[in-house]
Image (cartoon, rainbow, N blue to C red):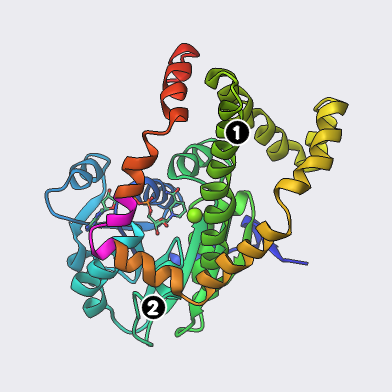
Amino acid sequence: MTRIYYDKDIDLNILKNETIAIIGYGSQGRAQALNMRDSGLNVILGLREGGKSWKKAKEEGFRVYKIDEAVKRATIVHILIPDQVQPEVYEKYIGKNLREGMALCFSHGFNIRFKQIVPPDFVDVIMVAPKGPGLMVRELYKQGFGVPALIAIEQDYTGKAKERVLALAKAIGAGRAGIIETTFAEETETDLFGEQVVLCGGVTELIKAAFDTLVEAGYQPEIAYFECLHELKLIVDLIYKYGIEGMWKNVSNTAEYGGRTRGKRIINDSVKKEMKKILEEIRSGKFAREWVLEYKSNMPVLNSLRSIEKEHLIEKVGNKLREMMKLK
Ligand code: NAD
Ligand code: MG
């Protein structure tokens, strides 16, 4: 069985002589910096001078430095800026200021897994990845709880990488909920797969295909919207809380019979075959190369998809209905 670590298994004291430089004060940066500070760690911030985050972090009582300066003052550098900008920022301000025995920490493995950042061999390379958005990381911490986190060790130069990363995870509150060890490869590959196939890609295309099918058959778009999109939340909430079998217990027998027999015709072997291809593109680095290139050339594909897809009928109908339901 997978080992789960909790607060009682972890010694926060091992960080008492360390200075943690958090690079970035966005969603994760702010939440993790505040939690670590409240847990008694010595936290400084490395930001772009004069930026919006700079002002905010100062107002919230942090010592704020330019990124290279923060790295020079730190023993642990926790990089919490958007993944696409990390390689350039690392190249310019971080890499050349690393000293022997420091730790380089991430909350997502993409840049290490796909070698967009190649750290020197004289530092620890670790990851603490909370399984929730920054706001929740902060909110639950304040309530005396926390969101679970994954930890990983890519490089253990000091022999203390595990103690260090566990202590960082505890300091953001994750030890109250549970900490699970993974690898940079597993975290990155499963994260990309999940968002492409289910969470962001799969679900939206499933919704649109079903919506289109009803509308093309002559049903009203408003009705199609409720059935194929709006109600999804109710079902996902049930699955989230009670699991798939628990969800079946909470819908009608008709829905359960129809769902259990018809669902398999939609998500069939050909879909699974395509999922395997997508996983292979992730593991081979093909997807990462494609995305890095796309980002560097100012995202022509993404921008064109954005402008095409925002014209879909489901967007117009959705806007109207969400307003009607006062959801926005
Ligand atoms: P974000 O988009 O909220 O970060 C924005 C911050 O990055 C800004 O406030 C600014 O301080 C800094 N920044 C932006 N561009 C910069 C540049 N060019 N140079 C220097 N600083 C710059 O980022 P985030 O969503 O908090 O993600 C940070 C890391 O956490 C990523 O590795 C991400 O994968 C990971 N992560 C995020 C979430 C999440 O819920 N957002 C969850 C788990 C892991
Ligand atoms: Mg993801």
Question: In which quadrant will I find the N terminus?
Answer: bottom right
Relative to 199, does residue 293 appear above or below in the rendering? below
Tag on residue 213?
A: 1
Question: Residue at coordinates 60% horizontally, 20% vertically from top-left?
Answer: 219
Quadrant in the rendering for residue 260: top right
Dominant SS of magenta comes to: helix
Q: CA distance from mark 1 to mark 2?
A: 43 Å
**Residue type, numbered disc 2:** Lys
Question: In which quadrant will I find the C terminus?
Answer: top left
Relative to 81, does residue 30 appear above or below in the rendering? above
Identify the element where label 2 is drawn: loop
Foreground residue among 170 and 315: 315
In magenta, the rendered stretch is 295-303
**Residue type, numbered disc 1:** Thr
Is residue 16 rendered magenta in the image? no
Which residue position is annotated with label 2? Answer: 115
Q: How many marks?
A: 2
**Callout 1 crowding tier (Cα within 10 Å): few <14, some 14–19, many ≥20:** few
Image-based side of 165 in relation to 25, left or right: right
User: Residue 185 placed where, x, y %?
Assistant: 54, 73
In the orientation shown, which residue stands out farthest toward the front? 217
User: Residue 154 placed where, x, y %?
Assistant: 49, 78
**Callout 2 crowding tier (Cα within 10 Å): few <14, some 14–19, many ≥20:** few
In the orientation shown, which residue stands out farthest toward the top? 324
User: Residue 323 placed where, x, y %?
Assistant: 43, 15
